[in-house]
């Protein structure tokens, strides 16, 4: 592959560590604890100067994947720059996420772009999927559940009002800071931003898909009808009866799509109680 154009955004300490001329190649060859390894993409965890970081290495998606996405009316994710931009946008709209350290992209052929993203390790966190895993049989304190639902609703509202859709908006990608939780604070992070979409205004279909993913992923968390209605009230920031009467068709779409996702992954239809 011809090297083509290289764009690099990195702090001085990282450039000093690897050398400016060698930085891109060194990061792309870096070995570490593997967290994900799929065709064209790998995520590793490494120690740099005594601190833990994640490196996402992208080796090119190939024309087959590009055409597959385009034929499905989806825009293909070509490089780590998508996540880099998403992190900065989340910072702008006030949603905590993994801190970005560096990003590099090399090449001009969209099918063979090479890129990387380095982010800080968030440390002691727990995903909402793990947190809620036994809520059906061992429910949390009502006050804690109520507060958490409101925080998740506020996060979703900020995300969508900011023109962003996650595209993988499952509760496993929303995490609590354990150290802050021990001190009584609910501090949420939104992670796994590989496919995030950014526009001036979110499209209704993208908002619907995000909400369906969130609902589907929470279906086994033991939530009640009242819990879902509380979420809707804080997500839409208006009187509940207005949301239900004005957006009944939208939330029915959310419920139907979530049920299809549940059937796909669990082989059975869920009991839907959203609308």
Image (cartoon, rainbow, N blue to C red):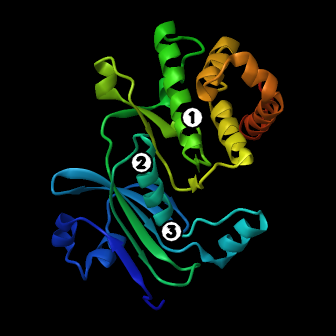
Residues at marks 1 and 3 touching, judged by CB atoms closer than 8 Å: no
If the image is split into quadrants, where does the C terminus sit?
Answer: top right
Q: Determine whether the residue tagged by mark 1 lies in a helix, strand or loop.
A: helix
How far, Cα to Cα, is label 3 from label 2? Answer: 21 Å
Percent x, y of residue 54: 35, 55
Hey, which residue is sitting farthest bottom in the picture?
Answer: 2
The secondary structure type at the circle numbered 2 is: helix
What residue sits right under mark 2 in the picture? 92
- Pointer 3 residue: 79
Residue 252 image point, x, y percent: 81, 30
Q: CA distance from mark 1 to mark 3?
A: 27 Å
Can you identify the residue that label 1 sits on? Answer: 157
Closer to the eye: label 3 or 2: 2
Left or right of residue 39: residue 19 = left
**Residue 43 drawn above or below residue 142:** below
Instruction: Name the one closer to the observer, 257 or 12.
Output: 12
**Front residue of 144 and 263:** 144
The circle on residue 274 is none
Residue displayed at 44% across by 88% down: 4
The residue at 20%/73% (across/down) is 18
What residue lies at 46% left-to-right and 59% top-to-bottom?
A: 85
Circle 1 crowding by C-alpha within 10 Å: few under 14, some 14–19, many from 20:
some
Residue 207's x, y, as percent? Answer: 68, 42
Residue, far top: 142
């Amino acid at each position: 592959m011809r090297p083509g154009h290289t764009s690099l955004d990195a702090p001085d300490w990282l450039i000093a560590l690897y050398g400016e001329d060698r930085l891109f190649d060194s990061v792309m060859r870096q070995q570490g604890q593997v967290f994900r390894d799929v065709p064209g993409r790998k995520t590793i965890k490494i120690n740099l100067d005594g601190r833990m970081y994640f490196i996402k290495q992208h080796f090119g998606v190939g024309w087959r994947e590009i055409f597959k996405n385009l034929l499905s009316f989806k825009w293909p994710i070509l490089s780590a720059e998508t996540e880099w931009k998403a992190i900065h946008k989340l910072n702008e709209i006030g949603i905590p996420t993994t801190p970005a350290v560096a990003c590099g992209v090399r090449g001009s052929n969209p099918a063979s772009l090479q890129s990387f993203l380095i982010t800080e390790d968030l440390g002691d966190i727990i995903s909402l999927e793990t947190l809620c895993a036994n809520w059906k049989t061992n429910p949390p304190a009502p006050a804690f559940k109520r507060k958490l639902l409101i925080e998740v609703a506020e996060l979703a509202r900020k995300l969508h009002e900011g023109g962003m859709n996650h595209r993988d908006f499952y509760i496993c990608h929303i995490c609590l800071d354990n150290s802050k939780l021990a001190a009584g604070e609910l501090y949420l992070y939104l992670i796994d931003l590989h496919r995030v979409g950014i526009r001036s205004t979110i499209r209704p279909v993208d908002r619907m898909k995000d909400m369906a993913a969130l609902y589907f992923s929470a279906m086994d968390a033991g939530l009640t009808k009242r819990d879902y209605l509380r979420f809707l009230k804080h997500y839409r920031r208006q009187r509940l009866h207005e949301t239900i009467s004005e957006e009944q068709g939208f939330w029915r779409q959310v419920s139907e799509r979530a049920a299809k996702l549940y059937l796909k992954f669990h082989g059975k239809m869920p009991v839907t109680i959203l609308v």
